[in-house]
Image: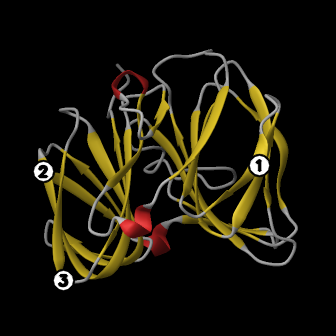
Amino acid sequence: MNTQLFKSNTRGKANFGWLNANFSFSFGNYFNPERLQFGMLRVLNDDTIAGGTGFGTHGHSNMEIITIPLEGGLMHKDSMGNEGVIRFGEVQVMSAGSGVEHSEMNASQKDEAKTLQLWVFPDTENVTPRYDQKSFDIENQINTFVNVVSPKDSNDGNALWVYQKTFFHLGIFDSNTTVSYNVRIPKNGVYLFLIEGEIEVNNQILTARDAMGITDFDTIEIKISTKSKILLVEVPMNQS
């Protein structure tokens, strides 16, 4: 097993007043040649959006975009005619494909919204754009990794799907427990992002908002020190 620890305070940062953003990988005005991507995972932005503000209409193409609200809600609207609010417990996917425009605005006029947005390179380009969202009962499945995103060709209907051989899992874990994750596709890597809590992986301590890139493994053992919320993103390390 090879691991690389990324402490939360080494991420790129931007504060525009209405938006306080932390970038795990190069994004916007933040450029770090050593942090361009992790395999097919291109973006992991940790955003706090002020009430009454948000991302106005803008375009994307050929990217799988996954949005995970942590607090508050986001009002989504896109050029495909989709419109609605997503909140904690829900996950949103959008295959930008041949091109789509959308906006993501804070659903509250006064309260902050906190969200993770991730971009994954697709394995099929110029597809017809698509959108989906789904609610997952993560809080009532403690000490379990809940599969929220999986590949189109191996989706069991319980998770959202995307055009890439990637698996997203979310989990809330009690303190003083141990959990394992088995790689789903050999040679894939895992980007572990600790949303809350404190854990130990491969004799290294992670605290809130730390991340770890993990490659060349079959099973990851995670020791939970304090109650923790974890996002695991399994992705191909190279485009097939």
Q: Which residue is mark 2?
A: 219
How far apart are the two marked residues, 2 and 3, measured between alpha carbons?
Answer: 19 Å
- Looking at the rendered structure, the secondary structure element under dot 2 is strand
User: In this orientation, does residue 240 appear?
Assistant: yes
User: In this orientation, does residue 21 appear?
Assistant: no
The label nearer to you, 1 versus 2, is 1
How far apart are the two marked residues, 3 and 1, measured between alpha carbons?
Answer: 39 Å
Image position of 91 (left or right of 4): right
Q: Is residue 66 above or below residue 194?
A: above
Which residue is at 79% across, 72% downward?
50
Q: Amino acid at mark 2?
A: Thr
Q: Nearer the viewer, residue 32 or 101?
A: 101
The label nearer to you, 2 versus 3, is 3
Locate residue 209, reporting x and y percent.
45, 71
Q: Nearer the viewer, residue 51 or 7?
A: 51
Q: Amino acid at mark 3?
A: Asn
Q: Which residue is mark 1?
A: 84
How far apart are the two marked residues, 1 and 2, measured between alpha carbons?
Answer: 38 Å
Total number of numbered discs in the rendering: 3
Instruction: Indicate which disc, 3 or 1, sits on the residue closer to the N terminus.
Output: 1
Q: Which mark is residue 176?
A: 3
Which residue is at 62% across, 15% downward?
126
Which quarter of the figure has residue 47? bottom right
Which quarter of the figure has residue 12? bottom right
Locate residue 22, reporting x and y percent.
59, 65
Q: Nearer the viewer, residue 181 or 190?
A: 181
Which residue is at 14% across, 65% downward?
202
Display coloring: secondary structure
Q: Amino acid at mark 1?
A: Gly
Crowd band around label 3 with a 10 angstrom C-alpha radius: few (<14), some (14–19), many (20+): few
Crowd band around label 1 with a 10 angstrom C-alpha radius: few (<14), some (14–19), many (20+): few
Instruction: Indicate which disc, 2 or 3, sits on the residue closer to the N terminus.
Output: 3
